[in-house]
Image (cartoon, rainbow, N blue to C red):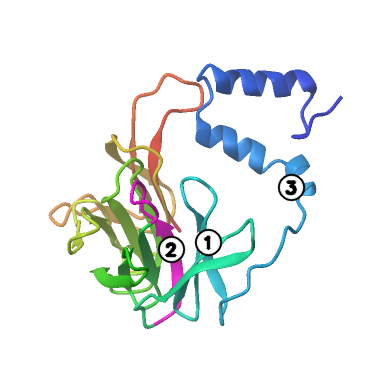
Amino acid sequence: MKSLCGASKDDKFVEFWKREIGLSVSRTFSRRIAASEGVVKQLDLYGKLKGHQGCVNTISFNSLGDTLVSGSDDKQVILWDWATKTSKLSYPSGHFDNIFQAKFMPFTDDRNIITSSADGQVRLGQVLENGDVDTKRLAKHGGRVHSLAVEPGSPYIFYSCGEDGFVQHIMDANKQGREGPSLVTLTPDMILHILHLSRMQAMPFLEEHYERGEAAESEEEGGGGDDAIDFGYSEDDDSEEGGNSIECDVG
């Protein structure tokens, strides 16, 4: 007999048992379950959240899962109570172009929200006690900024990546962000789109692939050849899932 995830009942039991005793990391487990055909086929429309005046490019849950933040081509950021399908707060982001990503910073009581945009800016919105929102620029890329990745467990540290080929390491969400050229440098013919963090403490790595492109670990050390390079962090981990990692995919 097949389970919800398309596997036998025994396979399903083993999957949950491995997760329970720590042999399966949460990220891998959630991807297997959430992306399974059986789960997707049972999804149904719960409701529609209406409030933006342009295309919605990003949504993200808070840590409790009861609030959504969305960003749009209308340059507005909206916080939603998805259960009641109502808007809790809406504010102008301060961006001059389409918002590509919006995320809550952890351990800030959902009061700190970071955004990135086609205008190259990375901005912070801080919800004040009176309900007003103070926004400011934290960093600036030389091209559109597609992705933000929050360092797990930190209310201050996150990364941004954009079409200028730079990853910016923003150390403190309450201070001006700084560019980190020691992280990764890419040739102009490559576009950096996806940045994903999964663990706070890690060691850096550069992984070479046989694709077009170049990279360098620092401004002083240049990459060679026609290979593409993935930048990231990894930890030693004996689990069969391959351990924990911080990944930066180049495409």
> Up-down: is 215 above or below 241?
below
Query: Quarter holding the N terminus?
Result: top right
Give the x, y percent position of residue 150. 36, 50
Residue 176: quarter of image: bottom left
Q: For mark 2, does the 10 Å Cα neighbourhood hold few (<14), some (14 to 19), or many (20 or more) residues? A: many
Give the x, y percent position of residue 136. 26, 72
User: Which residue position holds label 3?
Assistant: 40
**Cα distance, mark 2 to mark 1?**
7 Å
Q: Is 84 covered by the magenta stretch?
A: no
User: Which residue position holds label 2?
Assistant: 102
* Circle 2: residue type: Ala
> Measuring 63% from the left and 68% from the top, which residue is drawn there?
49
Nearest the eye: 135 or 138: 135
> Measuring 50% from the left and 79% from the top, which residue is drawn there?
73
Give the x, y percent position of residue 94. 34, 78
> Measuring 32% from the left and 63% from the top, which residue is drawn there?
129
User: Which residue position holds label 1?
Assistant: 59
* Labels in figure, total: 3
Q: Are marks 2 and 3 in contact (CB under 8 Å)?
A: no
**Cα distance, mark 2 to mark 3?**
25 Å
Nearest the eye: 165 or 17: 17
Tell me which segment is drawn in magenta.
97-110
The mark nearer the N terminus, 2 or 1, is 1
The mark nearer the N terminus, 3 or 1, is 3
* Circle 3: residue type: Val
**Cα distance, mark 3 to mark 1?**
19 Å
Q: Secondary structure at mark 2?
A: strand
* Circle 1: residue type: Ile
